[in-house]
């Protein structure tokens, strides 16, 4: 199945309106809207430390994280980001549907061919401040359906190449996705009050002072 190029470009500019209402543990303050050129200066700068990190420190893919519909947080992202909605069967089994992986512009017709990733990976979040959080706050972060940037459905190949790297180490293979990606990375860091290390901030600043300076950054602080 091949969609036309116009549709592909349109899908790369998905609305920044929140996909789903925040869960009670993700209560939020007022929304902030700014440009990447301004937002980059709002991120605190700090060195990173990986000591003590385990993925199990972030309880994730909770069933019924937002809706009492039998779907876990991962499935809710797949449903919300579909360009053509899948059918939802018993035990939240998804069938049909279509998606566009914006990192690499790959069109996907099978939900099993997609992974849902944390925009700021769990290990990076730990390094950037989450190591000091309560278990409840880490769980809220790992299942954050209250902001469209926090979780994203993309191809497994893209996620594997990214792993836990920040923008100084990895960017989406599709150049047209870079401004969106960096702005959503920054929005997620600001939403959760996470720091950036100097190399990460330098990489973001290149975009913030250049081609992406006017890209919108919209975020709501998680409380």
Image (cartoon, rainbow, N blue to C red):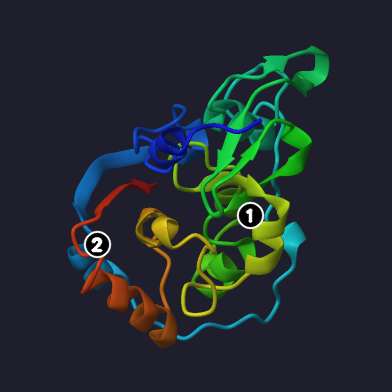
* Residue 9 image label: none
- Distance between the Cα atoms at labels 2 and 1? 31 Å
Residue 53 sits above or below residue 48 on the image: above
Q: Which of 105 and 140 is in front in this view?
A: 105
Residue 21 x %, y %: 44, 27
- Dot 2 alpha-carbon crowd within 10 angstroms: few under 14, some 14 to 19, many 20 or more: many
Q: From the viewer's perspective, is 56 left or right of 120? A: right
Residue 19 sits above or below residue 115 on the image: above
Examine the image and state in which quarter residue 220 appears: top left
Examine the image and state in which quarter residue 176 appears: bottom left
* Residue 36 image label: 2
Residue 3 x %, y %: 54, 31
- Dot 1 alpha-carbon crowd within 10 angstroms: few under 14, some 14 to 19, many 20 or more: some
- Residue at the disc numbered 1: 135
Residue 27 x %, y %: 41, 37
Residue 189 sits above or below residue 15 on the image: below
Examine the image and state in which quarter residue 202 appears: bottom left
Which residue is painted at 72% across and 33% down in the image?
111
Residue 70 sits above or below residue 166 on the image: above
Badge 2 element: helix
Which circle's residue, 2 or 1, is located before the other in the chain? 2
């Amino acid at each position: 199945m091949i969609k036309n190029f116009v549709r592909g470009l349109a899908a790369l500019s998905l609305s920044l309106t929140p996909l789903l209402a925040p869960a009670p543990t993700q209560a939020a303050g007022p929304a902030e809207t700014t440009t990447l050129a301004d937002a980059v200066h709002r991120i605190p700068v700090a060195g990173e430390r990986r000591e003590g990190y385990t993925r199990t420190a972030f309880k994730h893919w909770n069933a019924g994280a937002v809706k009492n519909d039998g779907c876990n947080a991962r499935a809710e992202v797949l449903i919300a980001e579909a360009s053509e909605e899948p059918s939802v069967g018993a035990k939240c089994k998804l069938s049909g549907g279509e998606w566009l992986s914006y990192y690499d512009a790959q069109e996907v017709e099978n939900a099993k061919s997609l992974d849902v990733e944390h925009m700021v990976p769990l290990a990076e979040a730990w390094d950037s401040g989450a190591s000091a959080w309560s278990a409840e706050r880490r769980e809220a972060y790992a299942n954050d359906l209250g902001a469209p940037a926090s979780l994203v459905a993309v191809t497994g190949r893209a996620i594997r190449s990214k792993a836990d790297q920040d923008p100084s180490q990895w960017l989406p293979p599709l150049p047209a996705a870079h401004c969106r990606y960096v702005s959503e990375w920054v929005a997620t860091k600001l939403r959760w009050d996470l720091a950036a290390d100097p190399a990460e901030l330098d990489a973001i600043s290149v975009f913030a002072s250049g081609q992406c300076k006017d890209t919108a950054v919209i975020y709501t602080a998680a409380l």
